[in-house]
Image (cartoon, rainbow, N blue to C red):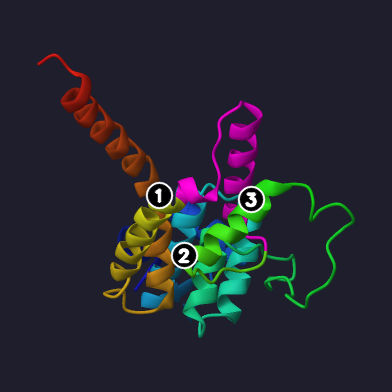
Amino acid sequence: MRISELSRRSGVSIPTIKYYLRDGLLPAGRPTAANQAEYDEDHVRRLRLIRSLIGVRGLSVSATKDVLAAVDEQQGDVHLLLGLVLGALPVERSGRPPRRDGAAEPAGAEDAAGDAAEDVAALTAEMGWKTSPNPPAAQVVAETLETMRALGVDYDWRSLVPYAELADRAARLDLDQLRDAGDPLQQAERAVLLTVLLEPALLALRRLAQEHHSALRFGNG
């Protein structure tokens, strides 16, 4: 297809496509003349993933370039690819995921979250979840538990088990919706959309459900 058709199919403007080509985010097309080239479905899928990473996840062009470099190396490993595009795994400037070689953490880092970090470890063990070492999401849970305790709320990992069970069901639904994607790039794009775009809606649904059950329990009709 010509660049005009590529723009129409991907939803990305021609000037932006040319910028991505110059910056190396998008591979060059097949030359057909001095200033013309043809593009294929791989370019469409790549542009849609770029649009998802920049427009939906909010990554910078530079960070997107790093993620795409890692994606190019890891397309045979869908699990690792999803971790890269969703931010569950950080990406080095080389375009590769950091090594997981058991290197020691900086002094004091292990104790930073204190009991909250131990709670998260206990929770993931209880759920039987297999996760990467020190994932960002686990740090968020630990920091939340620390804050609640600092405010005098008696909350530990056991209190989170029912919520973790709901999250487990939601994650299964998310991944079920990737089955129809034809290749790893489509799976990566859909994973970004389902994870980032749906999160505000999921929170809103929780609020609606809370209003409903509050009305049932405490409302006066």
Q: Position of residue 198 (x, y in %)?
A: 35, 48
Q: Report, in whole angstroms, how far the alpha carbon at label 3 lies from the one at label 2.
A: 17 Å
Say which of 144 and 27 sits in front.
144
The C terminus appears in which quarter of the rendering?
top left
Is 102 left, or right, of 149 in this rendering? right
Residue 107 at least partly seen: yes
Who is closer to the viewer here, 14 or 135?
135
Crowdedness of circle 1 by 10 Å Cα count: few (<14), some, many (20+)? few
Residue at image coords 61%, 26%: 151
- Looking at the image, residue 205 sits to the left or right of residue 92; the answer is left
Q: Secondary structure at mark 2?
A: helix
Q: Residue at x 51, y 82 (%)?
A: 77
Identify the mark at residue 91; answer none if there is no mark.
none
Counting from the top left corner in percent of width and height, residue 177 is at 28, 67
Q: Amino acid at mark 1?
A: Tyr
The CA distance from mark 2 to mark 1 is 11 Å
Amino acid type, mark 3 = Gln
Q: Are marks 3 and 1 in contact (CB under 8 Å)?
A: no
Report x, y in % for residue 142.
Answer: 62, 47
Q: Which mark is residue 127?
A: 2
Nearest to viewer (mark 3 / mark 1) = 1
Return the mark for residue 163. Answer: 1
Residue visible at 40% across and 63% down in the picture: 191
As drawn, the residue found furthest toward the top would be 220
Residue on which the image places disc 3: 139
Task: Read off the magenta span.
Answer: 134-160
Neighbourhood count class around disc 2 (C-alpha, 10 Å): few under 14, some 14–19, many 20 upward: few
